[in-house]
Image: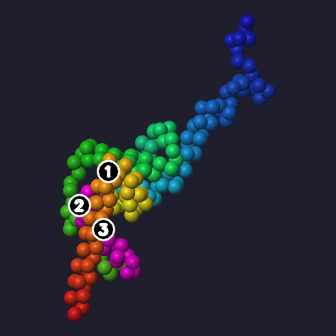
């Protein structure tokens, strides 16, 4: 009778079935942690770049990425398809960014007041082009900025962007077309201005 109330001990003295290495809960947690660590390693850079474009502040961008990964960890079991991980994380990041504005109204900064790199500090023509592109993308209307950033920085297709933003694909493609046209026009104006400066 007493045998039913006491658990059987194995040769090592541990109660049978209580070995954490073989416990289904432990194995499940290890799988969950492995999956999460792989996500962090694979996608941290992409999320940070996107976050930085949204916030234009390195510290806020990193905080936003950390919040995103914290929420992702809590919901990792809902991610059924690893191929959808990037879009899933971008969606979480966008929601976290929106929450940032709900929690407190941040002071809006005029882009002209935003500190820009001085041309003498740029080390190459490529860096100057990247700086120019960064400034001009930041000046695009938000409805054009976000799809363009998702495409350029995130590598998402028009259909994936439509899903992420809750828009139809035609709207996304139109916004991408207009964003690129506005950048092209700004580039043409910059070339003309440089041409007149040398003439």
**Label 3 Cα neighbours within 10 Å, binned few <14 / some 14-19 / many ≥20:** some
Looking at the picture, tell me which residue is in the foreground, 138 or 106.
138
Mark 2 or 1, which is nearer the eye? 1
Which residue does the numbered mark 1 point to in the structure image?
168
Which mark, by number, is residue 180?
3
Looking at the picture, tell me which residue is in the foreground, 19 or 50.
50
Q: Taking the image as drawn, is residue 117 in sight?
A: no
Which residue does the numbered mark 2 point to in the structure image?
141
**Label 1 Cα neighbours within 10 Å, binned few <14 / some 14-19 / many ≥20:** few
Labels 2 & 3 near each other (Cβ < 8 A): no
Horizontal side of residue 154 vs 108, given as left or right: right
Instruction: Report, in whole angstroms, how far the alpha carbon at label 1 lies from the one at label 3.
Output: 19 Å
Q: Taking the image as drawn, is residue 16 in sight?
A: yes
Looking at the picture, tell me which residue is in the foreground, 7 or 138.
138
- Give the quarter of the image for residue 72: top left
State which quarter of the image contains the C terminus: bottom left
Q: Position of residue 105 (x, y in %)?
A: 22, 48
Labels 1 & 3 near each other (Cβ < 8 A): no
126 part of magenta stretch? yes
Query: Which portion, as a residue range, is magenta?
Result: 124-146
Q: Residue furthest front?
A: 170
Instruction: Report, in whole angstroms, how far the alpha carbon at label 2 lies from the one at label 1.
Output: 19 Å
């Amino acid at each position: 009778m007493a045998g039913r109330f006491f658990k059987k001990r194995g040769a090592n003295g541990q109660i049978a079935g209580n070995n954490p290495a073989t416990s289904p809960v432990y194995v499940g947690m290890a799988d969950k942690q492995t999956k999460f660590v792989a996500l962090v390693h694979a996608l941290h850079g992409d999320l940070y770049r996107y976050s930085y474009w949204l916030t234009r502040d390195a510290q806020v961008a990193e905080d936003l990425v950390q919040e995103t990964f914290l929420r992702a960890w809590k919901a990792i079991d809902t991610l059924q398809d690893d191929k959808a991980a990037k879009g899933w994380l971008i969606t979480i990041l966008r929601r976290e960014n929106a929450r940032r504005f709900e929690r407190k109204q941040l002071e809006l900064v005029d882009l002209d007041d935003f500190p820009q790199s001085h041309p003498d500090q740029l080390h190459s023509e490529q860096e100057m082009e990247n700086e120019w592109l960064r400034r001009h993308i930041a000046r695009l209307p938000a409805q054009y900025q976000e799809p363009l950033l998702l495409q350029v920085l995130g590598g998402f297709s028009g259909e994936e962007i439509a899903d992420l933003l809750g828009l139809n694909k035609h709207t996304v493609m139109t916004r991408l077309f207009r964003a690129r046209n506005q950048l092209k026009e700004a580039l043409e104006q910059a070339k003309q201005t440089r041409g007149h400066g040398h003439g």
